[in-house]
Amino acid sequence: MFYSILYVVIGFILLVIGGEFLVRSSVALSFKLKLSRMVIGLTVVSFATSAPELLVSIQAALNGLSDISLGNVVGSNIANIGLVLGMTAIISPLLIDKDFYKFNWPVMVVLSFTLYLMLKNDGILNRVEGLILFLALSLYLIILIRRSHKDGDTSKEVDDSLQKTSNFKIVMWLIIGGLSLYFGSELLVNGAEDIALRMGVSEGVIAVTLIAIGTSVPELAASIIAALKQEKAISLGNLIGSNIFNIASVLGITSMIQPITVKDETLMEVNIYWMLAFAVVLLPLAFIPKKMILSRVKGLFIFGAYCIFIALIFLK
């Protein structure tokens, strides 16, 4: 048990370090590519922070542990909004860009409901459905980048010194960030899983709670650091983008390699509805009562809802 706790602590430290380097490299890259910070958050940061979910889900699917593959993504998407976005807004209220409700949010909601319908249909996420999800992600990225160039959006309120960052430094920061996130997530997930097993918690509960939280820590680290640095566009873009990547990329790629079967009834009867609710509730929160600001009160509301979700999982 001692070593498991140690793994968790070291994992958290590595993930915070990884988040710092990832945000740094992302901002510097946005200058080089002349893309908006939102686009960088939705692409570079989201790919890197979705890597833990992808690795865990593929490994679980190959080992016949479908509950972990699906539970990991569903739980992670819930955690990204309830835990990460909630805590980020509590630390620093977020200004919401109009692109949020005109483009990014609708894509996340459509993909969430698409996943629900695919699983509700026959309880299996097959290779064809996986390919459809992955193609949807490719289309999303193409449209996203084209919109960015068309809008001519430039980085604002960023560290100007990053504008002169060399290509070598950017690559090194990305490598350090990516490796820190990878090994940090591995240690955190392994440690958390061992602790949960010793406590006698079921596989489904482990996936939706500890593993999901563990693989969401990169998002938490990157978003909190970005919020503290006033890189709010990256904070929000990272979270929405990560949920899109989790469904379209993680489950898309995983199911193309190994079809995923729903085994845990709780996933389709309870958990996936929580995922849909957290995705949908973001729109009214963006306009009520104060438009285009995710205030501390709203952050507390989202975080409180997440705590209720976790409590109900363990109580059941």
Image (spheres, rainbow, N blue to C red):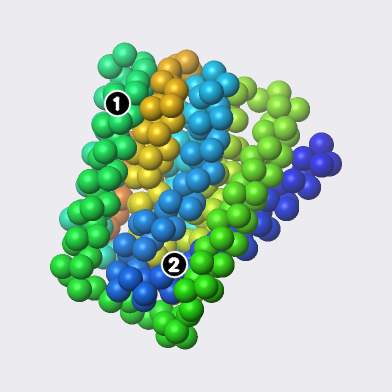
Left or right: 241, with 169 as reference point = left
Q: Residues within 10 Å of mark 2 (few under 14, many from 20)?
A: many
Image quadrant in which you'd find residue 176: bottom right
Image quadrant in which you'd find residue 292: bottom left
Q: Residue furthest left?
A: 150
Which amino acid does the dot numbered 1 rest on?
A: Glu
Image quadrant in which you'd find residue 236: bottom left
Q: SS at mark 2?
A: helix
Query: Can residue 78 be spotted in the picture?
Result: no
Image x and y of residue 211, in percent: 58, 37
Image x and y of residue 7, in percent: 74, 46
Residue 137 against residue 34 in the figure, above or below: above
Quadrant in which the C terminus is drawn: top right
Which amino acid does the dot numbered 2 rest on?
A: Ser
Observer-nearest residue: 174 or 110? 174
Query: Can residue 96 be spotted in the picture?
Result: yes
Q: Which disc is residue 108 wearing?
A: none
Count of number-bearing discs: 2
Q: CA distance from mark 1 to mark 2?
A: 31 Å
- From the image, tell me which residue sits under label 2: 26
Quadrant in which the N terminus is drawn: top right
Q: At 15% across and 68% down in the image, what residue appears? A: 150
Residue 158 against residue 308 in the figure, above or below: below
Q: Residues within 10 Å of mark 1 (few under 14, many from 20)?
A: many
Left or right: 130, with 11 as reference point = left
Left or right: 2, with 111 as reference point = right
- From the image, tell me which residue sits under label 1: 129
